[in-house]
Image: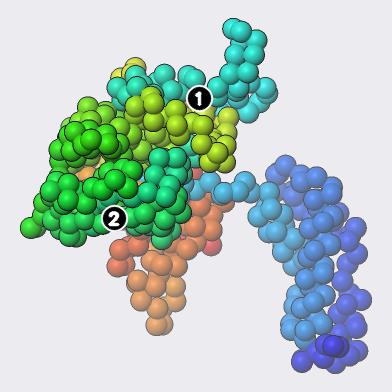
Amino acid sequence: MSRQPSSLTNQALARALRALPSVDALCNALADHWATRGEPLPPQAQRSHTARATLQRTRETILAGHPVNISLEALVSEASGYLKSAMQPTPHPVINATGVIINTNLGRAPLSDAALAAVSAIAAGYSALEYDLEHGERGSRLTSVRALLRDVTGAEDALVVNNNAAAMLVALSALASGREVIISRGELVEIGGGFRIPDVLRQSGARLVEVGTTNRTRVADFTTAITSETALLLSVHPSNYRIIGFTTTPALDELAHLAHQHQHQIPLIHDLGSGALLRTEQWGLLHEPMPQESIAAGADLVCFSGDKLLGGPQAGIIVGKAALIGQLEHHPLMRAMRIDKLTLAALHATLQAYPNNTAEQEIPVWRMIAAPADEMKARAAQWAAALRQVGIVADVREGLSTIGGGSMPGETLQTWHCAITPKPVSPSNDTAGDAASALSARLRSGLTPVVARVLRDHVLLDPRTVLPEQDATLIQTVRDAFAN
C-alpha cells in the first residue's frame, strides 16, 4: 500500500527527503557533538547504527506527512538522545528517595560493600564454583553458604534456590506431589505480581486442604483434617498483610507437636517470606518472626527470601532437617531453580555479617532501619539548604518511612523529608499538584533518575533510603530538573 502524505505535496516531500544528510555526515556530526561535551565517544559501529536508525525514523515521519525538523542540529540532538539511552545500563540505576526501604519495583535490597566486592571478584574470572580444591574433584556450589546458614539459623542443613516461590515449589514438589497439604484459610497469601500460595501448591502437584476460617484457625482444625493422604502441614507467615481483631492462629510449636506426634510423622513447613535474622523490635518495630525461632519451635523446613530483610541478593533459602533437605536436593527441579555464581557470592558475603555481628553496620537495609530520626533530619536540612542556595523553595518536614517489599505491613519509622515546592507548570490553569507531578517526572528523567514521593503540592525526598554517597548526585538532579 502506497503512503499518501497528508500535509506535504509530492514535490515538497521529495525535497525534504533529499535534504536529509547521509549516514556518514550525521555520524561525524554526532561524534563532534559528543567531543564538544567532553563525554566518552561511543564506538563507531554504535554511532553508525544510531545515525542510520535516526534517519530511517525521520524518513518514515516525512512519508507519513507529518512535520519534522530535518536540520542537522535537530537530527544530532535526536540521535544523541538515542545513544545515551542505549548506553545506559539495564536495569537503569536510580536513587530511591521514596522512603520505602525494600522497594520491590526498585530492586528490593541494595547490596553491601562486601557483597559487591564478592560479586566483582567472582565475575572477573574463573572460580571454584563446583570444584573441590582440596581433593581436585567436583564439589558442591553450596558448601560454604550451607555452613553459614546452619550457623545463623541453628538448622541441620540448608539449600538455596533462585527465590522464595521457587523454594516453596521445590519443597512441595519433592515432599507432597499427589498428596495433601493442610493450610489455614487465613494464610492463603498472594505475593507480588499476583502469584498465590494456592497456585504454587497446585503447580507442585499437591492437593490443597484448607482448614479453619479467615480469622480463626485452631490446632483442632488441623487435627481433624489429617488423613493417610496428608503429606505436609504448611504454615505461612502473612508478611504482607495483617489480620487484627477477633483472631486465633495456632502457635508454630503447637503445629510441630501435632505433626511429630502423629503416627505418620508429618513434616511441618514454615514459609516465613521476609527472612529477618535480626530482632526488629529493637528499632521500635513489631517483632518479625525469624528463621532461627521457627527451627527452635520445631519446624522441619523453613523457607525465606534472601533479598528482603536478610538484605542480600534475590534468593530462596530453605533450612531444616538434613533428611528432608537431602530429598529436595536430589529433586529434578533443583537443577532448574539453582542460583548462579554471582548470586552465590553476594549471598555468602551478606550472610557473613550475621555471625560477625556487623549486619547493622554493613547491610544497607539494616543501616536504613537502624538510622535515627535525628540523622534523617540533619541530612534533609542539608539538602534543603543546598537547594535554597539556587532559589529552589525547600524545607524540612516530619514524616514516615516504611519497610516495604511485602514485609512488616503497617510498620513505619519516623523520618524527616526534604519537601520541595515546585514552580507552577504554567501560570494559567495548572494546579500545584500538577506542578509537583511534573517535577517528579523530570526527576525520573535525569541522568541518574531520582524516584520521589508526591504529597499534594510537594515533592518529598526521604533521606532514609538514599545512600549517603548519593547525596551530591541527588542535589544536582533536583537542580537540573528546575533548570529544564
Where 245 falls versus 65 (above or below)? above
Q: Residue at x 39, y 82 (%)?
A: 429
Q: Is residue 404 visible?
A: no
Determine crowd level at label 1: few under 14, some 14-19, many 20+ residues with C-alpha closer than 10 A: some
User: To which quarter of the image does residue 287 belong?
Assistant: top left
User: To which quarter of the image does residue 17 belong?
Assistant: bottom right
Q: Nearer the viewer, residue 244 or 207?
A: 207
* Amino acid at dot 1: Leu
Q: Is residue 265 left or right of residue 342?
A: left
Determine crowd level at label 2: few under 14, some 14-19, many 20+ residues with C-alpha closer than 10 A: some
| Marks 1 and 2, the one that precedes in the sequence | 1
- Residue 431 image position (x, y, % from top left): 36, 76
Q: Which residue is mark 2?
A: 209
Quadrant (top left/top right/bottom left/bottom right) for the N terminus: bottom right
Q: Is residue 147 visible?
A: yes
* Amino acid at dot 2: Val
Q: Nearer the viewer, residue 307 or 263?
A: 263
Q: Residue at x 41, y 29 (%)?
A: 325
Element type where label 2 sits in the image: strand
Q: Residue at x 49, y 57 (%)?
A: 444
Q: What is the number of the mark on residue 340?
A: none
Q: Is residue 287 left or right of residue 292?
A: left
Q: Is residue 358 left or right of residue 333?
A: left
Q: Nearer the viewer, mark 1 or mark 2?
A: 2
- Residue 217 image position (x, y, % from top left): 15, 53
Q: Which residue is mark 1?
A: 142
